[in-house]
Image (tube, rainbow, N blue to C red):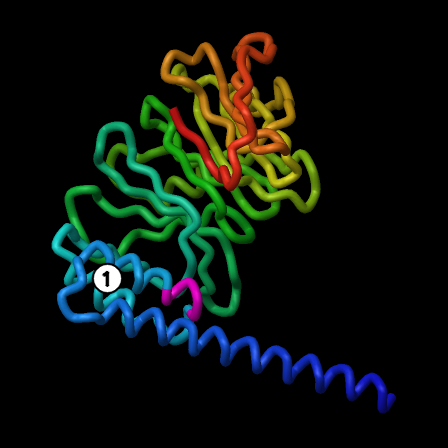
Amino acid sequence: VTATVAVRAAGDAADRARAEAQRRAGAQIAAEAATPGLPADTALLLHAAAYLTAPGQQADALWQKAATYPGLRRVLRMPATGTVDGVAFSPDGRWLAAATSQTTDGHRGGVAILWPASGDGIGVPVPATPTAATSIAFSPDGQLLAVGGATGTVTLLPVPADGAWPAAAEAAVTLPAPVKGQEVERISFAPDGTLIAAGYTDGQTRLWDRRTARITATFEGRRGAFDPGGQAIASLDAANRVVVRRTGTLDVAATTAPIPGAADLAY
């Protein structure tokens, strides 16, 4: 018992020391960001770096700096405390959507937040997944909003013509998780809207038929993205190479050399 307590105490001390080191590092970066005469772009990036280093201490400083950034058009407010894991504009430019994880009445769930693209204020929350929402995308025809979740589900919400988003949740269709415990990292619609490429944290991308809600194909690769013509789909493999496949057969058409640090891709 004594040994267990000693190890636990040592672990707690290490955690406190690590947190203090992060606080000091964040404060140092924030001080550099406040250097007189520093270009606005550089100052904002340094404040962001300070926030990433010590989120708890530097959040207010980051947002204060962002609010005075010359290129800032507007700040959109969340209806509750949460994190944002993805954003998407609707094809017609009417809506900006965010995939978020929020805590409401003690329950943490995935929520799609919608703002009119031409307005501001607090966004409209639409329940989308039982747990954190991790990715989001509109269909090319603008009729569906797809929200990927931390448990591997993909929720398809019909986009209401009248803007009544809460009602959309009642008509939602959920694509089930193909593998337990794997979250959806990326959602991409084919240009004709019939296929949905969902990339999961198991390193696999699965193609869903939007009409039948069934998986039509699975291939190795993450962050799948269709080309504008719908003839190819690109993804990142385990070696961080971009692999381009023909959409119809999934045959490999091209492969790049490894790209160190590659985290995402887009056409």
Residue segment shown in magenta: 50-54
Closer to us: 127 or 36: 36
One can see residue 16 in this view: yes
**Which residue does the numbered mark 1 point to in the structure image?**
43
Closer to us: 34 or 232: 34
Q: Residue furthest right?
A: 1
Q: Is residue 91 magenta?
A: no
Q: Is residue 124 above or below residue 68?
A: above
* Element type at mark 1: helix
Give percent across and percent down for residue 107.
52, 64
Closer to us: 41 or 78: 41
At x 55%, y 53%, the residue is: 131
User: Where is residue 3, by image quadrant?
Assistant: bottom right
Q: Specify the quadrant that holds the C terminus.
A: top left
At x 55%, y 40%, the residue is: 184
Q: Residue furthest bottom?
A: 2
